[in-house]
Image (cartoon, rainbow, N blue to C red):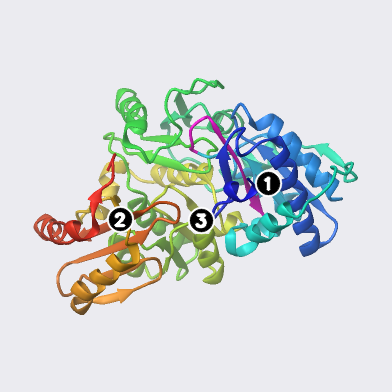
Amino acid sequence: MIGKIFKAYDIRALYPDPLNEDAAWRVGHATGTFLKQANGQGTVVVSQDHRPAAPSMAESLIKGIRASGMDVVDLGRCDTSIQYFAIPHLNAVGGVQCTASHNPIEYIGFKISREGARPVGADTGLKDIEALARGIEGDCPEPTGTYKTADVWSAYREHILSFMGELKKPMKLFVDASNGCGIALLEKVFSNVPKLEVITVNDNWTNDWAHEPNPLVPENMVPTQAGTKQHAAAVGACFDGDADRCMLVDDAGEICGCDHLTAWLAGHFLKEQPGSSIVYDLRSSKAVPETITALGGKPAIAKVGHVNLKATLRETDGVFGGELSGHFYFKGNSYADSGAITLAASLGVLSRSDAGLNEQMKPFRKYPQSGEINFENDDKQGTMDKLKQSHGSKGEVMELDGVTIDCWDTEGYWFNVRASNTEPLLRLNTEAKDEATLAKLLAEIKPVLGTVAAGH
């Protein structure tokens, strides 16, 4: 059963089968052992999200970590991104958040980080942890590592609000906390900020969520869109379950594409650190690298996934990065993602301009996009090879993540097709210089890709 719970970037599964307290103890012991082998004796930071299973699962995880001989500092119920602050802040060798992010309430899981808040994915330690967990035999040894709790909210608030700076004018913010960890952020970080008025919805801890805590699903953004317009807010925000992602809505109630937000915020961060690289995922609009280049920055393209974005940001010593999933990454945050910092930085930028967010986003919304479309396909590699043969001669072929065929300068379009790691699906993202070119391209390649999957 251990193998079923390990994914590419984290541990996640249904509770209590296959992921339960026994598995949590094994994951804890294996994680502690892995971190001890890498760093020697030290402290592991643990926190948890808002799910019903989180308290007992975090408790079992902690017992496993302590049984490996490692010490534990327990932060309690917090957003995932507090890990990326607390690990260096407490001089810890790593950390674990007990969370299943935006998944339905029946799920639970763990996100693991190393020293310096470096992510642990399949290629950076998660496979080693899985092997260690599989190899545990016999009775559970008694905990030998120490245990204590800590409250880092005051320092965390100061850290997040440093990305905002002093607001230059009164700002009204509407937030959907998604009945999740965004509640704690609103209370501990965004309350009593000078010149900031915050109006909230779904801001109570409950096991009966108002909606699935996934802001990538358009219907889950409806409360944010409606509330932003109703209250004439400067910006609306919707957090996911563990609040490491934050999707924004402009003052006209329009959802801001995360690639467009990357381009918009690039200007702010390049003013602070001119000439730096800005990282973006390969599904992003051409407006992103165009904007970064025009501002004197260095565009750095990355594979999809938080492990890959963080690695590219570190490798290029980039100042900022953004991903279509709603994760945004900051050099000043251990190169890690933070929904709270995304919101804080956006509020700061908006307060320094007379133009509203909708007006400021218009220059980046200039090219029509397909959005991500999933296709049922049992011959994923064969289909990608066919696309290379049919379209590769028209432009540049890149195989960083699936296949990207860039015919922007010759045909006026690009597209990326990636294979799902877990399902017989191909994922398409494409963009064109005009609607007619986009429609023509989709008519050509959709039949090759297969049947559009249900819900897409």
Compare marks 3 and 2 and give the one earlier in the sequence: 3
Lower position in the chain sequence, tag 2 or tag 1: 1
Residue, disc 1: 96
**Circle on res. 306:** 3
Element on which disc 1 rests:
strand
Could you give the CA–CA distance between mark 3 and mark 1, rounded to whole angstroms? Answer: 16 Å
Q: Front-most of 342 and 61? A: 61
Q: Quadrant of residue 231?
A: top left
Residue under the image location 29 percent in, 48 percent down: 360
In the picture, measured across the screen, residue 322 lies left or right of residue 156, that is left
101 or 170, nearer to the observer:
101
Q: Is residue 415 above or below residue 107?
A: below
- All told, the count of numbered labels is 3
- Which region shows up in magenta? 102-114
Residue 141 at what x, y percent from top left? Answer: 88, 44
In the picture of the structure, the residue carrying the numbered disc 2 is 377
Closer to viewer: mark 2 or mark 1: 2
Task: Say whether disc 3 or disc 1 marks the residue closer to the N-terminus.
Answer: 1
Compared with 65, 270 (above or below) is below
- Report crowding for label 1: few under 14, some 14 to 19, many 20 or more residues within 10 A (C-alpha): many
Tag 2–tag 1 contact (CB < 8 Å): no
- At which x and y percent is residue 166? 52, 42
Q: Position of residue 441 (x, y in %)?
A: 15, 61
The disc labelled 2 sits on which kind of residue?
Asn
Query: Which amino acid type is marked by label 1?
Result: Val
